[in-house]
Amino acid sequence: MSIAVRPNTPADPPVPAGADEQGGAMATTATTTPALARPPRRSSPQLRRRRRRDALLFCALIGPNLLAIIVFSYYPALYNIGLSFFDWDFVAPTPEFVGLENYTGLFTSPAFGEVMANTVIFTLVSVLGSIIGGILLGSLLASKLPLTGFAQTMAFAPHMLPGAAVGILWLFMFDPNYGLSRWFFSLFGADSPDWTTTSDWSLWAITIAYTWQRLGFVTVICYTAILDLPKSLYEAAALDGAHGWKLFRHLTLPLLSPITFFLSITGIISAAQAFDIISIMTGGGPGRSSSTLSWMVYDEAFQKFDIGTASAAATVLLVLLLVLTFVQVRIGEKKVNYDS
Amino acid sequence: MSTATLETDQVTGTPVPQNRGRRRGPRRPLWLTGLMFAGVLGVIAVFLVPLYWLFSSALKPQDQIYTWPLQWIPGQLTLDNFLEAWNSAPFDRFFLNSIITTAVGTFLELTLAILCAYAFVFVEFRFKKIAFVLIIASLMLPGHVTLIVNYITVANLGWLNSYQGIILPGIASAFAMFLLYQYMRTIDKDILQAAEIDGAGHLRRMLAIVVPLSSPMILTATLIVMVSKWNEYVWPLIVTSTADMRTLPIGLLFLRSQEGYSNWGVIMAGAVFVSLPMLILFFLAQKRIIGGLAAGALK
């Protein structure tokens, strides 16, 4: 509410916020209507009162949302950084200050290295996979062949499902004895790997399931973007004799680059936070083989009650994602034209 | 876009010049069209087969699941798996909890979003820009970073394992607010000015003019918010501690740990419980949902 006070000129007498909501609104609109016709530079008492009333109304309208955002987003993000310098277990009456110990602990432990490597692999593969797949599928759907509408619907459907359901469906499909995986590998005369129960495969299992869920969303965004591309450029290129692959490579891809860029950044941000699929398919295991940073935050905080380590890991996640977002905004300003 | 031109186009395989960007100059060779169509069928298979597998397994008797070669088409259909899932975990509570938290949470978030978007579009204020950036920038804060402190906050409020504890931390709205903001900006300001001259205050103008005019986007935003609340996983997992407060996605984890790998039919039936409401919603309103999400991403 401190923002609310500042714009008011000090001379204005304080008016209770709620009092002029209705009755006051009627009265002042009646007086300000003629005021609008006057030269706008002169700030009459009516105009000032109206401005102050608007300011109060504005604060009342955005107040609840802003308050919720501050209490449940900004405050916890900052507080979390603070917690990362303490040792705590949720139970002890006061957290113990340990300085940078949690961070040195993280960066010297091989476990954290493994978790970071898993996070990078999971993120890179799922983002690259969904974007390459999404552009190809999006162009395919934009061809307007029969059934493309149905294909779009089917591709998008998994994006609507809870990650828990997607995870458990893939867990079944990856069952080496009775799942679709056995059938698929038997086509090549091979046995299905033990996807979720061996550390060689578990990371790939969650990556595949996650990419499958995300692919439809990326496809539909690419498809919409392709339909929005300027037709005139294609006509000109066609006159120059470009077609097929050449046209796709030298016209469609470059024109899509802002979208691709946007999708890769937002893709990284959501992949780095993927949780439900991991939780239900592997629980980060076996061992740490499918633990990502977001799983680690949960595991350390809510299963091992090591709040210091968990909040330090969360802070690492925050810094990484903020750097990425910053890069996106900076490059986005240069490259992307946001005129709608 | 006329379907007539598109259809002749499909029959002859000749691109029609006035069509969309992807239709270009020289004709596409027949083999390429064939290849692309095979690609479309492949896409459908990749997404349809797992979903078919989900539903068909839920309807199969157990002996048809634990068999090799795989039984693609169920020899007989049964609802036993659903009954068993319903009895082995308190799914009635899961449903109730999911419905309550989704409905109340969506209502609250949309209310905040409408009030907020209205203020940004129609009310003058000197520090509007700062407030706007503050709200939109919260989209960039990864939710996982706030988990620990939100848990502490909710615990201090005495809201652990309660509906308000599940719902309230999620009602802050940036995405839905942004969608509504974009939409309200297109509303003709003259109508509002006329109403103002007629003596309608902001509250009247919002409820009688802006909300009805924005109803298509309000509906879209409601659907998108609803889906994300229904699917919410990590927060309800942390904040609830007894089975009778769990929501459906957490119930699925519960069911899995009870049934293990030994009873896929029952687990798939549980997954159908969780997924079916969202699938129905999606098939009824897919244009709206896809359009809203695409608008949010492309703008």
Image (cartoon, coloured by chain):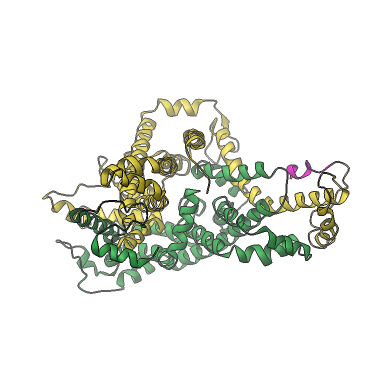
Chain colours: A yellow, B green
Please indicate whether residue B64 sits to the left or right of residue A21 in the image. Answer: left
Q: Would you say residue B96 sits in the magenta stretch?
A: no
Magenta residue check for A3 = yes
Residue A101 coordinates in the image, percent (x, y)? 50, 26
Q: Picture coordinates of residue A131 (x, y %)?
A: 35, 44
Query: Which residues make up the magenta segment?
Result: A1-10
Residue A310 vs A4, above or below: the answer is: above
Quadrant assignment, res A99: top right
Report whether B67 appears left or right of A278: left
Residue A203, x across and y down, in percent = 30, 42
Main SS class of the magenta portion in the image: loop
* Residue A253 falls in image quadrant: top left
Q: Can residue B182 be seen in this view?
A: yes
Viewer-side residue, A218 vs A256 = A256
| Front in this rendered view, residue A107 or B134 | B134
Residue that appears at 34% across and 68% down: B4
User: Which image quadrant: the N terminus of chain A?
Assistant: top right
Depth check: A222 or A33 in front?
A33
